[in-house]
Amino acid sequence: MIVIFFALFLRLYDLNNRPFHTDEAVHAIKFGELLESGKYIYDPIEYHGPTLNYFSLIPAYIFNEKKISEVNEITLRIVPAFTSIILIIFLFSILNAQNKIIVLFSASLISISPIYVFYSRYYIQESMLVSFTFSSIISFYKYFKLKKLYWGIFASLFCALIFATKETSIIIFFAGIFSFLFIYLSNRDLKSKFSFNIIHIILFFIIFISVTILFYSSFFTNPNGIFDSLKTFTNYFSKAGSNSDHIQQWDYYLNFLLFTKNDLITFTELPLFIFFIVGIIFQFKKNKHNVFLNYIILFSIIQAIIYFIIPYKTPWLALNFWIGFLLIAAFGICSLYKLLPRKNLKIFFSIFIVIILSHNFYQTYLTNFKFPYQPENPFTYSQPTPEIVSASKKIIDVIESDSSDQNIYVNIISHNNDYWPLPWYLRKIKNVAWNETIPNNINLFQVIIITPELENELIEKLYTLPEPGKINLYIPIFDNYTSLRPNIEIRGFVQNSLNDKYLRNQNKVQIENLK
């Protein structure tokens, strides 16, 4: 219980200490459609699966938030934070007198893992996907060991949730089925111990298909979503090999996980990677009949190889194999400890392991709490800084400085709709237009936000297209360089009359503060 509560604390404490990433904002706005209209249409091109959206309804209902303008970052990030704990809870289900140290060690490593904590505090699908994946493996293992139907039901349910969470489930299912067949067919003893209950198999597929249909059909309101859940793989294979924005070298994951050094952070998971190798050696020399560990090793290595090969890489994808590496590292540490012949060596080794764990916990503190959004953090990926929060507040303050009944119109313009995460931060503002090009009636908008390459065209349209006598003077909104994300600048302009109202309001506030 201590491990679970500590894991929850790391995932929930100061959950709003990092601005919303672009992907988080995209998913949040998509969730807003479901929250406000009750409708969800699965999109096979974007957004991944529906579980994140539907699970997000739970905290929104608990906090009585009925509109996206009422929802905040904590409401949404609670979802991956809590679902990531499922894996740790299920890990304790395999605890017994023989393996309790290994299980406790595994749960502790996963609980404080810097990368797992980081993406469990991130409103995207990856930590949910990983939690469902390894929980399903544990459920399958318990089912084959005990032959209890409820473990088969858990396994089926988790498999359905994996499929309904993200299209990369195809990698998980491939690695999972291949690993099972390889271990089953190469182990004569295992074949004799295995038996299949046909009723249980039928029930497994009924539950899997039913839950999958439930989510992808949007609870029977969008039958096309079922077929789209299969069509999405065409898009995924295309994206995996051709999206130049995310193309990385094969060793991308190893580079940032094993050693990152910059002005702010020196980060390394190398000791645990070495113990992962040690764990593999012990498994095949001393413990090769342990089916569960054989499966975790093979499953994790296959996933790692696939993700190394696929050119499309983002840091959160490393979670898919790294959690398995941590489980085997825990086994390696415990096996090496048992092998040591003398008490003083065991004491020395224990101190060494405590230092490694303490260092890993310190890295969790650095990456999640001290430098949660800084580009030097090895887990941030085009992460917005608090600059976007203060810029959005300035835009809102300017708009709200007008106390008349006049509508204030805002136009946000950027090529390829590259203005995220602004839609999240401006979600409370009415009359916002989002464009890729500058419309000819741009002079009708009191507030304009653009990217720098559009500024010359904007000035020309503002001061040449309106009829004489209808030209408005525009003033820059931001006093300094302002960015959406690292190296993505935005510039803002406000009509002079509205800017005057804003400045008068600011003066009033300053005078009130001096009283």
Image (cartoon, grey):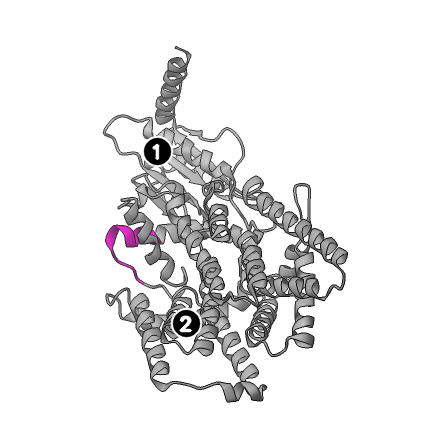
**Which residue matches tag 2?**
155
Q: Which callout, 2 or 1, points at the residue further toward the start of the chain?
A: 2
Quadrant for the C terminus, please.
Answer: top left
Q: Main secondary structure of the magenta part?
A: helix
Comparing marks 2 and 1, which lies closer to the viewer? 2
Circle 1 crowding by C-alpha within 10 Å: few under 14, some 14–19, many from 20 = many
Mark 1 residue element? loop
Circle 2 crowding by C-alpha within 10 Å: few under 14, some 14–19, many from 20 = many
The residue range painted magenta reads: 31-41
**Which residue matches tag 1?**
446
What amino acid is found at the position of numbered circle 2 in the picture?
A: Ala
* Residue plotted at (34% across, 53% down): 56
Q: Which mark is residue 306?
A: none
List x then y, in percent, for residue 316.
53, 57
* Residue plotted at (41% across, 16% down): 510
Note whether residue 374 is visible.
yes
Vertical order, 79 against 308 (above or below)? above
State left or right for residue 504 relative to residue 134: left
Taking the view exactly as shown, the residue that stands out farthest to the top is 515
List x then y, in percent, for residue 387.
50, 36
What amino acid is found at the position of numbered circle 1 in the picture?
A: Gln
Q: Quadrant of residue 470?
A: top left
Note whether residue 436 is visible.
no
Q: Quadrant of residue 128?
A: bottom left
Task: Give the total of numbered labels.
Answer: 2
Along the line of sight, the residue nearer the viewer: 331 or 221: 331
* Residue plotted at (28% across, 64% down): 218
Along the line of sight, the residue nearer the viewer: 96 or 216: 96
